[in-house]
Amino acid sequence: MTISVERLKKRTEFLRVAGTRRKWVTQGLILQGAPRPGIKPDTEYAGEDLLVRVGFTVTKKVGKAVVRNRVRRRLRAVAEQLMAELALPGWDYVVIGRNQTIDRPFEKLVDDMRFALRRVPDAKPSPADSRRPRKGGGAKKPGGSTKAGGPAT
């Protein structure tokens, strides 16, 4: 059974995977995963969809463009090695690079990815981050002011 691996490219796909809050953190990377909508991974139907999609992201906190691109290339190489054999069919994954990814030995990155791929499907969703404002502007503060700067009525 050969699984084909494709790429996630649209922002909405990345946000959907992140929205499930199912992730596993290792020293070299963070792996988020989510079953694709309309596919139940525990049924025989999931076996018919032998497609795994994976996306890569690295924040500016990791470094400048040259460093981020190198981290992304390393993560792509790790994913090429493991995704076809260990990823679950019908799932989407997002691999997030970390500061340690650039200096971590390649064999350790492979071990990190292997471990995370086994753990993500069983991971409990992480709690929502209360520090982040919700889409739509967030909650209004009581006793706020009007646009002109005066007290709200």
Image (tube, rainbow, N blue to C red):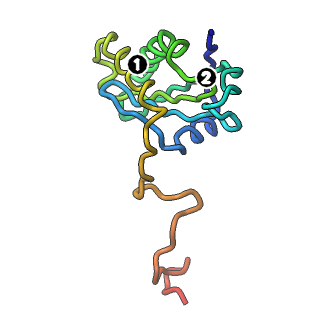
Q: Quadrant of the C terminus?
A: bottom right
Q: Residue at x 61, y 16 (%)?
A: 5
Residue at far bottom of view: 153
List x then y, in percent, for residue 61: 36, 35
Out of 18 and 137, give the one closest to the viewer.
18
Q: Is residue 5 left or right of residue 151?
A: right
Tag 2 secondary structure: loop
Q: Is residue 112 left or right of residue 148?
A: left
Out of 127 and 132, give the one closest to the viewer.
127
Tag 1 secondary structure: helix
Q: Quadrant of the N terminus?
A: top right
Q: Residue at x 45, y 24 (%)?
A: 117
Q: Is residue 145 left or right of residue 102?
A: right
Report the amino acid beneath label 2.
Pro
Report the amino acid beneath label 1.
Arg
List x then y, in percent, for residue 13: 62, 36
Out of 121 and 14, give the one closest to the viewer.
121
Which picture quadrant has residue 4? top right
How many marks on residues? Answer: 2
Out of 54 and 58, give the one closest to the viewer.
54
- Which callout, 2 or 1, points at the residue further toward the start of the chain? 2
Q: CA distance from mark 2 to mark 1?
A: 16 Å
List x then y, in percent, for residue 10: 64, 33
Residue 114: image tag: 1
Q: Are marks 2 and 1 in contact (CB under 8 Å)?
A: no
Q: Residue at x 37, y 22 (%)?
A: 115
Name the residue carrying label 2: 89
Q: Is residue 133 left or right of residue 52?
A: left
Q: Residue at x 40, y 31 (%)?
A: 30
Give neighbour class at mark 1: few <14, some 14-19, many 20+ (Cα, 10 Å): some
